[in-house]
Image (cartoon, rainbow, N blue to C red):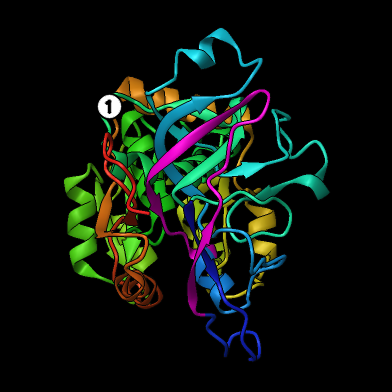
Amino acid sequence: MSRRLTIKKIEGKPGAVFYPLQLNDVPKPEPGPNEVLVKIHAAALNHRDFFQRQHLYPGISFENPILADGSGTVVAVGADVSASTKALLNKPVILTPSRGWAAHPDGPEDYYKFSVIGGSVAYPFGCGQDYMAVHESEVEPQPEHLSAHEAAALPLVGLTGWRAFVTKSGNAVPGRNILVTGIGGGVALQVLQFAVAKGCSVYVTSGDPAKLEKAKKLGAAGGVSYRDKDWDKQLLKQLPKSRPYIDAIIDGAGGDVVNRAVRLLKPGGVVSCYGMTTGPKMPWTMSAVLKNVELKGSTMGSRAEFAEMVAFVAERKIVPVVSRVVKGLDNLGEIDGLFKEMGEGKQFGKLVIEISKPGETAKL
């Protein structure tokens, strides 16, 4: 047998309801042709998991396991797998967090077949379980310098940040000034780490002074509190005289970012928006048009971009930031605590569930 963590449907309106967690015993999966069986060691939360529990996310499943992020060990392989996949037997891997987007640079080849995994009706996969059978193409070798917790913290936020910054902004270039909003969240932190590794000067915003200081320790050149009405003016004063403007803003909040961008960005600067946590709409102003500001939407990324991102993490020895780890898939009270922490925005980095330790037998 294996265990599977799902959400339980109860009555309630979207935004008011909060679906409880439920642990289910299920048959242990077997790998089919061209599949691998992965024993999951760690899984990480994302904001979509919190939104699912509030019924504020489309296509929610109450039967498929939750959580898109996971790492584990390949413990069995099915028939007809490639030689390179056979070499992964008993080796640690990172699981891909989505399905339905191979490599097209503009977006999924078939928009209606693309979905993030975990608690979704589109695909049965999710990392909140003991074992997971997936196609051999849906795993990447885990970078050797990462622990299971750190590896589980990488997939969704790493892919989202990579596409928003590297693919979409066009400013992953040494010497560019990059603004990353809402530092402390997983995507923002990965963008910070990627941009620093690319040789950019990175500036950040947060409502928490402690998070600004932590970001500076990770390589940020400066930061301001978005709670200050004049935070954009404060930020301009921090920029070097040799380059007194921002080249690109990587944003997951929305709100008044375009109004701020007009004051901060160079002519033709880019706002790469991967989320809108402050609300589903934001204004587009004539001032932005006159300054030739480019607003680019960015969601997740392709399988090809995922491979590029993991390779970059391995090459540059980037370590995802883990805020807190809870041990045990059956530790529902502590896992609920992670969701509460996320809802209150207290975390700095990823919130992780340890499901098993590498080399140990899962408790069934």
Q: Position of residue 359 (x, y in %)?
A: 27, 34
Density class for disc 1 (Cα within 10 Å; few <14, some 14-19, many ≥20) is some
Instruction: Give residue 267's quadrant in the image.
Output: top right
Residue occupying image coordinates x 62% and y 48%: 298
* Amino acid on which disc 1 is placed: Lys
213 vs 142, left or right, is left
Q: Is residue 45 magenta?
A: yes
Would residue 211 be seen by someone viewing this image from the given angle? yes
Residue occupying image coordinates x 43% and y 20%: 89
> Which sits in the foreground, 162 or 127?
127
> Which sits in the foreground, 243 or 161?
161
Q: Position of residue 194 (x, y in %)?
A: 38, 35
Residue occupying image coordinates x 22% and y 44%: 218
Magenta span of residues: 20-48
Q: Position of residue 266 (x, y in %)?
A: 51, 45
> Which sits in the foreground, 328 or 17?
328
Outermost residue on the top side: it is 83
Quarter of the C terminus within the rendering:
bottom left
Would residue 173 be seen by someone viewing this image from the given angle? no
Instruction: Give residue 289's quadrant in the image.
Output: bottom right
In the picture of the structure, the residue carrying the numbered disc 1 is: 317
Q: Secondary structure at mark 1?
A: loop
Indicate whether 75 appears above or below 128: above
